[in-house]
Image (spheres, rainbow, N blue to C red):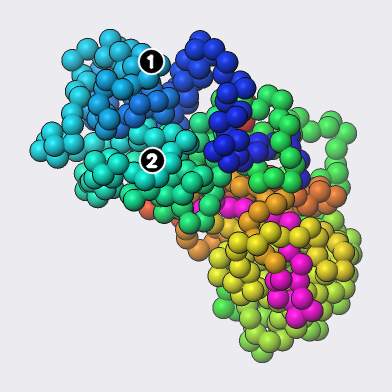
Amino acid sequence: MSTACTHPILSCAEAKALEVGLLTTEAGEWDAMQRAGAALAAALTEDALEIGGLGEAPRLLVLAGKGHNGGDALLAAQRLLADRARGSADVVFPFGAAPLRPLAHRAFEQLQRALPGRVRVLDLAQLKRAFSSYDACLDGVFGFQFRPPLDESVAELLAWINTHPRLRVRAAVDLPSGLGDAGQGKTVFRADFTYCTGSVKSPVVAPANAAFVGRARYLDLGFFSQDTGSPTAPRVLLPTVLGPLAALRAAQSDKRTFGHLVVVGGSRDYPGAVLMAVQAALRSGVGLLTACVPERLVPEYAAKFPEAMWVGWPENAAGGLSTEAVDLIAEKVGRATALVLGPGLGAAPETLAAAEELVRRVSVPLLLDADALRPDIVWAATGKRAVLTPHAGEWQRLGGRTGVEPAKGAAGGGETIAVLKGCPTRIATFPRRSETGAILNAGVAGNTCYSFFGGPVLARGGSGDLLAGLIGGLLAQAPDDLWLAAARGVVWHGLAADRLARDRGQVAVQTTQWLEYLRPALHCADHVIP
């Protein structure tokens, strides 16, 4: 795992120690708050595009606590409304305005000066009576030093906000109020987005908190210019992992320079999955691509995508991979630099037996996806270099469970990386396996990276096939670094999905429209979080 394109995920206590060491003066704290407010406003503006944007006259609700989180929320509101002359903000101070700490008070005064006549201060009773519609709510009640229990009046406020029917986006500053290292309060703010300012705190990635966190976004404020965190601690992926892919390629390159991928998949019942994997692989930058599919599919697919070399294999009675095809495919893989196996393969017994035999015979790095994620097939990859890309159901089919630290490597040696698709997606060293292929000690800690890119626009059939093809193409180009291929694929996949959702929304889209957003995702300015 590379630390150059990741930052450590900290406990709240570690985050406090980091900030105490970095922000040693009031001027330094104020500068960090200004940067946080600007980053929050920019990120929320972009994310709100998924539901049509905040509009020209947004109504904001700001929940501001006593400290810096409240100040960050107030400064973000100022930024959001600065260029929207018809926008307004309602501010609720759950503890009153008098206890505001100096910099939070300064942020509120700056908001009032910048937006004369457009800022109201309401208490909970007034808020309930007004029952206004809001385009966004910024939760800055508590910071990462929250300790339960939760004040009853604050719990009432958060509960009311959580059920407000006319609030389009709920955004938590750093952590949803009511979460911290010490556990949950009686009520927790339920965010659509949690914007982690400066560092990602461990409660954000705890599975028990997923319903409160929503989608996490990391706002890098420059706290890790000298990252001394442990490379084995949980970390968050940065867009900079894509930097080398956007650079100029060597002038003396040829197609062999960029690897040769073989994709094996498709069946009578699932003919489309392998086609999507091939399309994504073709966009990955790979030099050569051989697609091995059922014989009946070759004429149509070759006409659609002549860039690939299409090889038809003999089908079994169920229209899937037959044992007779193994020799043919193994010969093709022997000249390649990576293999993708699984998209649309089907689950007929002969198909799975043929897939298992193929895995035993090949020596190139391989990616197993979809129906190839079976205990016997995964076990056949023991001692090899493999990337697995399971969704939650496939992870359970392999015997996965959470809560226990994974071990490095797999039984029999080799290198295995698991891409555990979800919200957020995790990339981890795959745990040890038993002789039956069952996972012995799966988990989320240690050698684990999180990607906060992507969202519900990916919750549709085919998005996993696209990811498999993309990672496979990257793996063929860099077969000596499985982790890097997986990390780049996951980040690129998520960034493209974010752009698709912002441009076309989350609902009325097709899975393959994602392909058109790979280029802008790769060439985003400076590879900062969009």
Q: Amino acid at mark 1?
A: Pro
Q: State the separation of the CA atoms marked 1 and 2.
A: 21 Å
**Residue 244 position within the rendered picture, expressed as x and y whole percent measured from the top left:** 74, 34
In the image, taking residue 160 as reference, residue 485 lies left or right, namely right
Q: Is 308 on the left-hand or right-hand side of 83?
A: right
The quadrant of the rendering that contains the N terminus is top right
| Residue that appears at 27% across and 30% down | 95
Q: Residue at x 58, y 23 (%)?
A: 20
Q: Which mark is residue 336?
A: none
Residue stretch in magenta: 423-440
Callout 1 touching callout 2 (CB < 8 Å): no
Image position of 29 with respect to 481: above or below: above
How many neighbours does mark 1 have within 10 angstroms: few (below 14), some (14-19), or many (20 or more)? some
Residue 466 shows in the view: no
Q: Position of residue 181 (x, y in %)?
A: 51, 44
Q: Of the numbered discs in the image, which one, if any, rests on residue 177? A: 2
Secondary structure state at the residue bearing disc 2: loop
| 197 over 267 or under it: above or below | above
Please tell me which of labels 1 and 2 falls first in the chain: 1
Q: Is residue 115 left or right of residue 355?
A: left
Disc 2 crowd rating (10 Å Cα; few below 14, some 14-19, many 20+) is: many
Q: Is residue 430 magenta?
A: yes
Which residue in the structure is indicated by mark 1? 102
Q: Residue furthest bottom?
A: 317
The image shows residue 393, relative to residue 245, as above or below, that is below
